[in-house]
Amino acid sequence: MSAPRRVHVIGAGLAGLAASLRLAANGVAVVLHEAARQAGGRCRSYRDATLGCRIDNGNHLLIAGNHAAMDYLRRIGAEASLIGPAQAEFPFLDLDSGERWTLRPGAGKLPWWIFQRARRVAGTGAFDYLSGLRLVGAPADATVADRLDPRTVIFRRLWQPLAIAGLNTETEQGAAVLLGRLLRESFGAGGGACRPLVPIEGLSESLVEPALDRLHALGAELRFGSRLRALEFAGERVAALSFDEGGEPLAEDEAAVLAVTAPVAARLVPELSAPDEFRAIVNAHYRVAAPADAPLFVGLIGGTSEWVFRKREVLSVTISAADRLVDAPAEELAAKLWPEVRRAYQLGDAPLPPWQIVKERRATFAATPAQQRRRPGAATQWRNLVLAGDFTDTGLPATIEGAIRSGDRAAAQLLGGALALQAKGA
Ligand SMILES: Cc1cc2nc3c(=O)[nH]c(=O)nc-3n(C[C@H](O)[C@H](O)[C@H](O)COP(=O)(O)OP(=O)(O)OC[C@H]3O[C@@H](n4cnc5c(N)ncnc54)[C@H](O)[C@@H]3O)c2cc1C
């Protein structure tokens, strides 16, 4: 099929934005439909009335090795909107023992740094890191805990926190192959690839608003409050899209990218195999300013909080695979997590500041071997319909990087191959 003249992209999360940018930059007329009043989906910022400032719906960490995300940021002119340490470094605090350490992978591809105690996780030896190689070639049905020994210090202090954050799934259930892929693209690619990056202002300011500006500049049409209700199929094509506000017939030279969440895609596309099990993420935001020279984030071992991020106006806790907490009262969570935040950022006995708890019940699909098997590819049986979204089979767990790759891939599919992505600086 030659490249379509016009494409309707459904869903303005990062997958839909990425697909729209690629298509519009290749001269395709793009109409981007988003059910909500704003773009960004699960990766966005908003003003919180209780805190009196803008917050992100959840703390998101990128690494320099997220090449599709870095390329996306370059194309929307937002590279400089992220901040991170000059070298890869991950500060940790063990809440049980009080030990602090900073993991500092060296810049090169060969991991010589594991032989330097000051760069390692406290209590680990150089050869402990080789256990990570057990993820290479792990069978598709193996879990993280099947491949990495949960009784070891390196498991408790490194593999487990990385796995829970990266997969948003418990180590007893998370797919070893997905953690293996994450580690290959980070630690396996050298310390340069591991350099952590977070938005200076917020997720929307870095990843969403500049993308919308770029789409405007490329002539794309953006329709907010536009919810797709049904797809109408005719033979091997989608013949029309049905929105609340009316139908949109698809001409022979028109196509659609469905970049919605897994449950919505499963409702709209007959017999679609898609993940149907999800995990929650809980974030706790505290209105307090930490010293500007304090680390951008701290990993916590042995508590309920897993990572604490320092933002301009808040300190913010992330807890992944947090289904056990989603029904706990917000007051209880805020009071329970605050002492851990105080310790992470050495705030003495500072009283509980204004706070907000944000619970994303279906933050991501559960990255289990069984769910992994349910992930669909981009192509569908209808020649003018392609899928995008973090739940599609990107080889990665549900991440910004995976969502952007899925959008790029959907566009490439419609444009007739990856080569088109090189064209016109797309
Ligand atoms: C709390 C939290 C923390 C996270 N932390 C990280 C992190 O640290 N690092 C990382 O890489 N990733 C992280 N993620 C994952 C990351 O946010 C997602 O993988 C990514 O944003 C998914 O993008 P998407 O475009 O696939 O889906 P979504 O963002 O869900 O976008 C789908 C869009 O489709 C729209 N839509 C749905 N139905 C319809 C319809 N019928 N018609 C029109 N529009 C529709 C939705 O409103 C939404 O805007 C986190 C996620 C959460 C929730």
Image: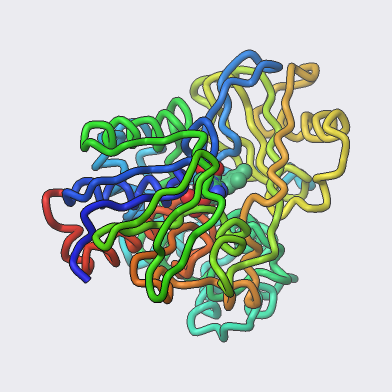
Report the residue at 38% width, 53% height from top: 249
**Colour scheme employed for the rendering of this structure:** rainbow
Q: In the rendered image of this protein, does residue 280 appear above or below residue 349?
A: below
Which image quarter holds the N terminus? Answer: bottom left
Report the residue at 73% width, 23% height from top: 355
Q: Nearer the viewer, residue 327 or 354?
A: 327
Task: Determine the residue located farthest toward the left in the rendered image.
Answer: 424
Dividing the picture into quadrants, the one containing residue 59 is top right
Q: How many marks?
A: 0
Report the residue at 75% width, 35% height from top: 340
Task: Determine the residue located farthest toward the top in the rendered image.
Answer: 52
Report the residue at 44% width, 72% height from top: 377
Q: Nearer the viewer, residue 150 or 378?
A: 378
The answer to whether one can see residue 13 in this image is: yes
Give residue 162's position: percent from left, percent from top: 59, 58
Left/right of residue 324 with respect to residue 315 in the rendered view: right
Left/right of residue 320 with respect to residue 234 in the rendered view: right
Q: In the rendered image of this protein, does residue 235 appear above or below residue 39?
A: below
Give residue 278's position: percent from left, percent from top: 69, 59
Dividing the picture into quadrants, the one containing residue 207 is top left
Left/right of residue 277 with respect to residue 248 in the rendered view: right
Give residue 18's position: percent from left, percent from top: 35, 49
The answer to whether one can see residue 103 in this image is: no
Give residue 119's position: percent from left, percent from top: 48, 53
